[in-house]
């Protein structure tokens, strides 16, 4: 496969995880996406290396991941988002596909605020947000472990 074809399919999963839960989500996503997905972990200081920024710049799709801390992304993720304004100035990420994920201790946990921040970030970059397209598991017989039990569409 040529490197052009490689980059045409490439997915970068950029995330911060303070205590490992979001890292587990990121790893599961990478496993599901296959060999073309690269994990890009934001460090405890909210920094990425130049090589990590390059992975994002070259990816066809960027998936954003952050834990929900106090009803929002972690400060480390926000620092990364603010630093991405350098790409925003010339719309370097325009038309890339975007998606996002979060997790929280409570089932609700105000995760939707975090997800809507990730959507706003993607929209500011001119990216194309991809939701789940999955119907909610809200039938009488639905149980907590059903996919999309919480009935979210941007993410479940
Ligand atoms: C500073 C802080 C703030 C948190 N705020 C929330 C919150 O608003 N809602 C919630 O349900 N859980 C909250 N939690 C729990 C985390 O969302 C949960 O433990 C998550 O799995 C942590 O992900 P991580 O291991 O990737 O850091 C908070 C945890 C921390 C450390």
Image: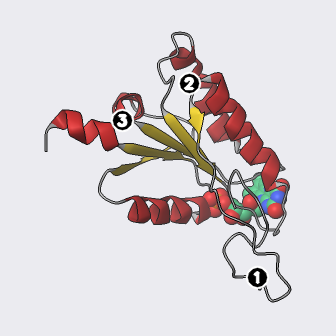
Any part of residue 48 in sight: yes
The residue wearing badge 1 is: 144
Binning the other alpha carbons within 10 Å of mark 2 as few (below 14), some (14 to 19) or many (20 upward) gives some
Determine whether 142 is above or below 26 in the image.
Answer: below
Q: Quadrant of the N terminus?
A: top left
Q: Which mark is residue 127?
A: none
Q: CA distance from mark 1 to mark 2?
A: 37 Å
The residue wearing badge 3 is: 55
Task: Please name the residue shown 34% across and 43% down the image.
Answer: 10
Any part of residue 44 in sight: no
Depth check: give the residue in front, 122 or 83. Answer: 122
Nearer to us of marks 1 and 2 is: 1
Task: Please name the residue shown 71% across and 69% down the image.
Answer: 148
Binning the other alpha carbons within 10 Å of mark 1 as few (below 14), some (14 to 19) or many (20 upward) gives few
Query: Disc 1, disc 2: CB below 8 Å?
Result: no
Depth check: give the residue in front, 154 or 38. Answer: 154
Depth check: give the residue in front, 54 or 17. Answer: 54
The residue wearing badge 2 is: 84
The answer to whether residue 41 is left or right of residue 38 is right
Q: CA distance from mark 3 to mark 1?
A: 36 Å
């Amino acid at each position: 496969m040529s490197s052009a074809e490689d980059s045409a399919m490439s997915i970068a999963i950029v995330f911060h995880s303070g205590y490992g839960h979001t890292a587990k989500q990121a790893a599961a996503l990478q496993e599901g996406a296959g060999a073309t997905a690269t994990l890009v972990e934001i460090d405890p200081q909210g920094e990425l290396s130049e090589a990590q920024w390059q992975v994002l710049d070259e990816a066809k799709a960027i998936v954003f991941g952050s834990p929900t801390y106090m009803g929002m992304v972690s400060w480390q993720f926000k620092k990364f988002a603010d630093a991405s304004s350098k790409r925003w100035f010339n719309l370097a990420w325009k038309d890339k596909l975007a998606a996002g994920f979060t997790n929280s201790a409570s089932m609700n946990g105000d995760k939707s605020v975090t997800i809507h921040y990730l959507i706003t970030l993607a929209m500011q970059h001119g990216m194309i947000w991809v939701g789940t397209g999955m119907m909610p598991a809200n039938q009488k017989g639905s149980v907590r472990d059903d996919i999309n039990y919480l009935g979210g569409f941007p993410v479940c």
